[in-house]
Image: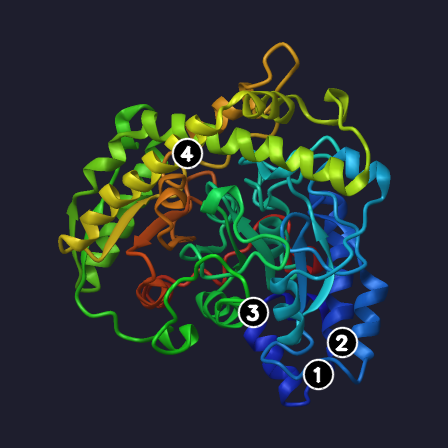
Amino acid sequence: MAAALASLDAMAQAELVRKGELQPLTLVEAAIERIEQLNPTLNAVITPLFDKARAQALSPDLPHGPFRGVPLLLKDLGCHSAGDPYHEGMQFLKNLGWVAPADTYMAAKLRAAGFIFLGKTNTPELGTLPTTEPVAYGPCRNPWDTTRSPGGSSGGSAAAVASGMVPVAHANDGGGSIRIPASACGVVGLKPSRGRVSWGPEYGELWQGLAIEHVVSRSVRDTAAVLDVVAGAMPGDPYCAPPPIRPFVQEVGANPGRLRIGCLTRAPGGETTLHPDCVAAVRDVARLLASLGHEVEEAYPPALDRSHERFSHMWTLLTSAVAAALAHWERQTGKTIRHEDVEPHNWIMAEIGRRRTAVRYIEAIQWLQADARRIAQWWEAGFALLLTPTLAEPPPPLGQFVSTPADPLAAARRGEVLCPFTVPFNVTGQPAISLPLYWNADGLPIGVQLVAAYGREDLLIRVASQLEQARPWAGRRPAVHAEQRER
């Protein structure tokens, strides 16, 4: 039963409960069995909440939402749940045994939809790297090749979904942290528009508007249906994305019409050489889009090429955010955080952030807002979508994102090389999705990214659904998967 359920997406599992064919506890026990079977290999789940999950599954108060009884994992960063351990990948918080006092708005919405939280997934410390190898919990491994990174910072969530532990898992994205692991693990990863999902009640925004909450999943319809659940403004939000005309799940299978799509097969600014597999993936999907009736041409926003300036100003925001995060945890815990409590790259980022002046911080925000307007103009000029690789290379081997006291920024430099296509759209706030449409000769997933104009998740979902129907990926299984182990 556990292996059989591993092949079903969240909507299919919810349908079994809705029809009375399965009880929520059956789904929960099957997912627990899969986690216990696979996690010793992958290290995707760092905090099991199994007893709580069983109790929720049996409770008469379990909400009758659209995902009643479906098991879900929360990334241990961002969306925290009341009474559960919450460590943000930090040894400091792990040592203190820190527990979140309350649900975030997103956690509350997921509960109201009927999801049952099974545990927390592995994440790099403070979510600042595109891999998942924290000192606190050790590396998470890619289920397609356990010597390789699952990406980050939502690497534990993506590995859990790809391996069949759960159909969907919470994730968030401040520079690609939904799309990067979605590409590396061969799952669906949609970064919604800025302001689509609330960060409240604790925060109005994180990383100065660069970061956004959502999930990783195995199907486009799950991605759309969960967005319907978690989207929407909450009291006190500083801004919100325009509401959709109709539920996002209704865009699945809808005809997108004939679209003009730009295609980019080199890194913005030319500062990184793309791996041939990533170029091949984009060209292959460009041909597929053309065969579906779309007009695809080599074109992209010229402003993307200002990558060096963009990174310089983002660095001011990110280092300031890390400094603020450490200050936040000092206030919350009443403890002083010292350099030995933090991984080297985060400590030096905080040190840099503390030295940034308020004037420089405001100047960085203003430059990035102007950058967003420059890039967004391209969509106003007649293009519906931009097609790019998600990453500049296949999933990299573990151990490449290592910082030391002698070279504390080595990991950050390595990350900049890997992720030239994801970061710009955190700056613009546009929705972007990574889709698992291509595998290389080594059997590794190579994601492709589609980017729409601000607020147009509906269009992304229509085209993603069209591509999913034209080239289904649901049957592909990594080497480490519940069904493979069952055999």
The label nearer to you, 4 versus 2, is 4
* CA neighbours of label 3 inside 10 A, class few (<14), some (14 to 19), many (20+): many
**In which image quadrant can residue 151 be found?**
top right
Q: Earlier in the sequence, mark 4 or mark 2?
A: 2
Q: CA distance from mark 1 to mark 4?
A: 54 Å
The correct choice, above or below, for 335 with respect to 27 in the image is: above
* CA neighbours of label 4 inside 10 A, class few (<14), some (14 to 19), many (20+): some
Determine the residue located farthest toward the front in the rendered image: 359
Cβ–Cβ under 8 Å for marks 1 and 4: no
Label drawn at residue 22: 1
Q: Position of residue 183 (x, y in %)?
A: 46, 46
Q: CA distance from mark 4 to mark 2?
A: 52 Å
Label drawn at residue 9: 3
Amino acid tagged 2 = Thr
- Residue receiving disc 4: 362
Q: Position of residue 197 (x, y in %)?
A: 50, 61
